[in-house]
Amino acid sequence: MNLIEVIKERKSIRSFIDKQVSIEDVLEILEAARWAPSASNLQPWEFWAVTGEKRQELVGKLLEALQKSGTTYSPSGGLSEKYAERLNKLISDILPFIEKAGIIDPNWIMKGSLSFYGAPVVIIVLFDKGSHSNKINVGIAIQNILLSAYDKGLGACSLNIPLRFESIIRETLDVPKNLKISNTIALGYIDEDNPLNNFKSSRAPIDEISKLIGFDER
Ligand SMILES: Cc1cc2nc3c(=O)[nH]c(=O)nc-3n(C[C@H](O)[C@H](O)[C@H](O)COP(=O)(O)O)c2cc1C
């Protein structure tokens, strides 16, 4: 598969089978992150792969915090009309797949995200506050992780909902003060039987997101 195919075919996976990802595969995926470009080559990131009992402990604490806080999924706050419309499109497009998967819990997206959708491995993406251009640096590395997971036949989903309980992740994993958690990634083998994983999101047309300047001079 060539790169553009990998880029276009990768998608978020939200249901995983109970099969461990080998440490070799995890390291190869982190190797892709390692080779991401960063401003001034500062490489201000760390990638922590968490599995087994520690992952269980983290999920248990996150779900407990969710229950105690009573937080429900309310994503549209602060979005301008254009982005609220795109969010609504995502929700209406994915809904039939959620129904087909037999999911009836209205807070499923919160619970699913906080349990990393059952993935056996969770990658915590961190950056050092002493660096700069951090969000861009880690964003590029995250895409490398997602693409290389797909390239290996594994499923992944970038997750920011767990950051709503960032202090729990910090405490559980003993994250030092200089590191900020930027994102978490669920990683595992795809549950091919779950209709949810058949969902493929759309994209806005190219003319909506691009401007070609000076090309007609040629
Ligand atoms: C920074 C970031 C945070 C995300 N957080 C979540 C999340 O918390 N829960 C979730 O189910 N999906 C999450 N997603 C997945 C997006 O919903 C998904 O990437 C988007 O709908 C496009 O679909 P695709 O990844 O299948 O192409 C996140 C994606 C990104 C890039």
Image (spheres, helix red, strand yellow):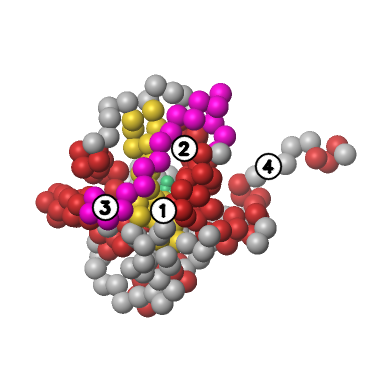
Q: Which mark is residue 23?
A: 1
Quarter of the image for residue 170 reads top left
Would you name the residue on which mark 2 appears? 138
Judge whether 130 appears above or below 8 on screen: above
What residue span does the magenta drawing correspond to? 36-55
- Inter-mark Cα distance, 1 to 4: 43 Å
Identity of the residue drawn at 39% across and 74% down: 194
Q: Indicate the position of residue 61 as horizontal and vertical percent values.
A: 17, 50
Amino acid found under the numbered disc labelled 3: Arg
Amino acid found under the numbered disc labelled 1: Ile
Kindly give the residue lying farthest to the top in the view shown.
Answer: 130
Quadrant including the C terminus: top right
Would you name the residue on which mark 4 appears? 211
- The answer to which of marks 3 and 2 sits earlier in the sequence is 3
- Inter-mark Cα distance, 4 to 2: 26 Å
Label 2 secondary element: helix
Would you name the residue on which mark 3 appears? 55
